[in-house]
Image (tube, grey):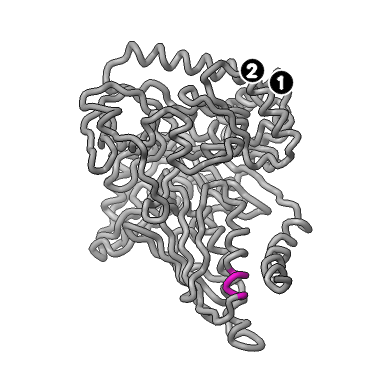
Amino acid sequence: MIHYLFAYFTPLCFVLLPFILCPMSAELIINVAPWETRVALLENGTAVEFHVERPKRPGHVGNIYKGRVARVLPGMQAAFVEIGLERTAFLYVTDVYDHLSEFELMLGRTDSNEEEPEDHVLQANGDEEPESLHYTPPPFRIEDLLHEGQEILVQVSKEPLGSKGARVTSHISLPGRNLVLMPTMNHVGISRRIEDEQERNRLKALIEEMRPKGMGFIARTASEGISREHLQAEMDFLRALWENIQQKGANLPIPSLVYEDLDITLRAVRDLFSGDVQRLVVDSRDAYERILEFIEAFAANLRPNVELYTEPQPIFDAFGIEIEMSRALGKKVWLKSGGYIVIEGTEALTAIDVNTGKYTGKRNLEETILKTNLEAAKEIAYQLRLRNIGGLIIIDFIDMADASSRDEVFYTLKEALKRDKCKTNILRMSELGLIQMTRKRNRENIKRLLTDRCFYCDGSGFLKSRQTICYEIFRKIKRDAPAYPTDTVLIDVHPKIGEMLLKEESSFVEMIERDISKEIVIRPRPEHHIEQFSIAFINRVAGE
């Protein structure tokens, strides 16, 4: 028994020691451009989360729609709902039923003090875990709750992914800075990240006392230490917002967008700019002013921590984020020891393979394998978060004969995943060295967002999307233009990129021309690879 406890706690001590000795330093970096806004969360100078939103491909998570039930599928216990998007949305039976006791019974939850939905950055409020790992038949039937043609108010909980439509729920949740309003659920929850029991009890007592009958609230992590007055003001604001949504929805046709969530900049402030984040740096004065106005209303104490970045070097270059983003698109990730991991995505799951690579160790084979696996476990937790990989994940660690070594790797991975605010569920390592886990997935991962399927290899690989290449060109021009006193920018690109620059992205080309006071000339080069481009700053007369 003593040996078992020692084996359990020893790996945890080594995992926790760096966090005890080195307090986590976090920063929020926001890069704003007319064609896209990018948000990166840094911990100890390393990018751990990345979010991007483009006007031509807006996000839908958090939006509320007035929809119509298009089809009811008893065999799947789900329905398709027409909400005005390209594809009908998917509504599962547990997202329709609104009686908390039955709802919690189905999910197998017993602790009403845990925050549900997760207090997560820029993410949806629903969970998705493969039924193959966790499935409990619902105690009610979709055909008893919905019928075709029925009007229904729903909120998007998961972005459309690939060929699938958005996932929606009728359990509306309206997040504020400190509270989340759940108008359809009679429930009070406290963020599990608030660990002080006295503070948890204080918040719960305040919310129980102030909330209207039948309305549910969750105290978010940011609410720790917040006064009664601030909580009451935010509660009143969220209630008024819900009443406005109901009134607006009653007068709109079907389908219609009833409520649109904040843009990515303000969502980052609302959901990410918490006590763990020491400062927020943004490179747009307009966005800077909007952020100050927002936090003045909800978190005035954070105003000194907001900075406007005005240096000539692009903000993502200055903080080393651009390099991290390039690495996040690759399949192979090298470890410091010389080992490496390979990340491969399929339609159904993500497979991660661990290899010793160049690392040969110093003593014996078992020690070499253990060290590689321990290093890989931490890197895998980091990569899952950075790349936003979700769904079913299978990790193939290098085989270890010793059961205590397998336990040590399992607990190392489990501890490393605690920094991930996205919900994860992990099973113990098998004798074959496999770990099965799930991670909540409700938006595209970085690879799907920034790449297209490769037409050179008939879809077996990926290329950067044409939009991504265009925006790389824009960034390079704006970065380099001040150093060249010329009148013309000559761009050599693949014809497909040239076509996009001259058509879909022409307004941004014209805007950059005005900003840098130079004419941009685009020259198609059929011999170029689609990702290849060159930029020359010339004087037009001399360059002709």
Q: Residue at x 66, y 88 (%)?
A: 363
Question: Residue 83 at what x, y percent from top left?
Answer: 29, 28
Amino acid found under the numbered disc labelled 2:
Met
Amino acid found under the numbered disc labelled 1:
Arg
| Disc 1 and disc 2 in contact, CB within 8 angstroms | yes
Asked whether, in this view, residue 522 is left or right of residue 224, the answer is: left
Whole-Å distance between the Cαs marked 1 and 2? Answer: 9 Å
Crowding at mark 1 (Cα within 10 Å: few <14, some 14-19, many 20+): few
Question: Residue 247 at what x, y percent from top left?
Answer: 40, 11
Asked whether, in this view, residue 17 is left or right of residue 75, the answer is: right
* Residue closer to the observer: 459 or 260: 260
Crowding at mark 2 (Cα within 10 Å: few <14, some 14-19, many 20+): few
Task: Pick out the residue farthest to the right.
Answer: 21
Instruction: Judge depth for marks 1 and 2 and give the one in front.
Output: 2
Q: Is residue 332 magenta?
A: no
Span of residues in magenta: 404-409
Q: Which residue is mark 1?
A: 228
